[in-house]
């Protein structure tokens, strides 16, 4: 390994674990200062989106499957997929953190209605209704590009299914809580992709 290759190998090996662990640590710390719940989803409902996310995480960071198309590459083993994927992942993580900061004490990791719940429509919520999911999907897509294997594509599909289920559940509750105000907001702001209703 040359002098240049050694630090690059370290970047390739640790960039994504450090990025995602840093995000998880921030998320855990930020979850300590939220409003009390007045309504929350059932454990079964929560499992319906947690299980696909856990399977996706295992596909990304579990052992490489043997004798499976999931371990085959859909992109060449080159530098550009890694750097493009890392750029997308960092951008997605930053969007999710911006959205989390904008929600403040209204945030919850589960589908809930908070005490004195506010309808937040500023910051990234003026661009999409679910910027945390948008940001995390972008970060997962970036992670899949950097890995370049089919298991990453399957993991992204599972993440999308989990987020889409949770998003629909949240929107039902937001409509019940905020009525016409939420309908008007949903009418002018896209769900996940800006300008795509």
Image: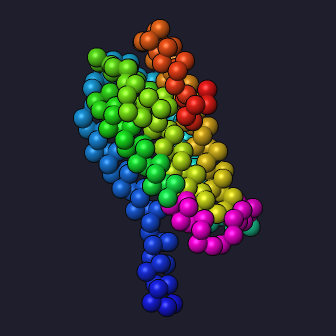
* Residue at image location 51% in from the left, 51% down from the top: 139
Q: Quadrant of residue 75?
A: bottom right
Residue 192, image x, y percentages:
55, 34
Q: Number of numbered discs present? A: 0
**Extent of the magenta region:** 68-86
Tell me, yes or no, whether the highlighted magenta stretch contains residue 22: no
Quadrant the C terminus occupies: top right
- What colouring does the structure picture have? rainbow
Q: Is residue 60 visible?
A: no
* Pick the front one: 116 or 4: 4
User: 109 above or below 119?
Assistant: below
Tell me, yes or no, whether the highlighted magenta stretch contains residue 83: yes
* Residue at image location 56% in from the left, 61% down from the top: 84
* Residue at image location 60% in from the left, 57% down from the top: 144
Q: Quadrant of residue 76?
A: bottom right
Q: Quadrant of residue 147?
A: bottom right
* Residue at image location 49% in from the left, 14% down from the top: 184
Residue 187, image x, y percentages:
55, 18
Q: Is residue 27 visible?
A: yes
User: 121 above or below 155?
Assistant: above
The furthest residue to the left:
33
Residue 8, image x, y percentages:
47, 78
The furthest residue to the top:
180
User: 45 above or below 32?
Assistant: above
Residue 195, image x, y percentages:
58, 31
């Amino acid at each position: 390994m040359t002098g240049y290759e050694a630090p690059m190998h370290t970047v390739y090996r640790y960039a994504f674990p450090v990025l995602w662990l840093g995000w998880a640590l921030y998320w855990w710390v930020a979850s300590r200062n939220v409003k009390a719940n007045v309504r929350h989803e059932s454990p079964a409902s929560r499992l319906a989106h947690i299980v696909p996310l856990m399977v996706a995480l295992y596909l990304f960071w579990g052992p490489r499957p043997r004798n499976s198309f999931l371990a085959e590459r859909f992109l060449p083993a080159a530098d550009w997929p890694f750097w493009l994927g890392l750029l997308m992942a960092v951008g997605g993580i930053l969007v999710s953190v911006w959205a989390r900061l904008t929600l403040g004490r209204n945030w919850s990791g589960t589908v809930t209605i908070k005490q004195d719940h506010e309808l937040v429509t500023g910051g990234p919520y003026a661009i999409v209704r679910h910027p945390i999911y948008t940001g995390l999907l972008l970060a997962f897509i970036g992670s899949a590009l950097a890995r370049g294997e089919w298991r990453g594509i399957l993991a992204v599909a599972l993440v999308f299914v989990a987020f889409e289920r949770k998003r629909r559940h949240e929107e039902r509750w937001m409509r019940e809580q905020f009525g016409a105000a939420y309908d008007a907001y949903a009418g002018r702001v896209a769900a996940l992709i800006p300008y795509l209703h």
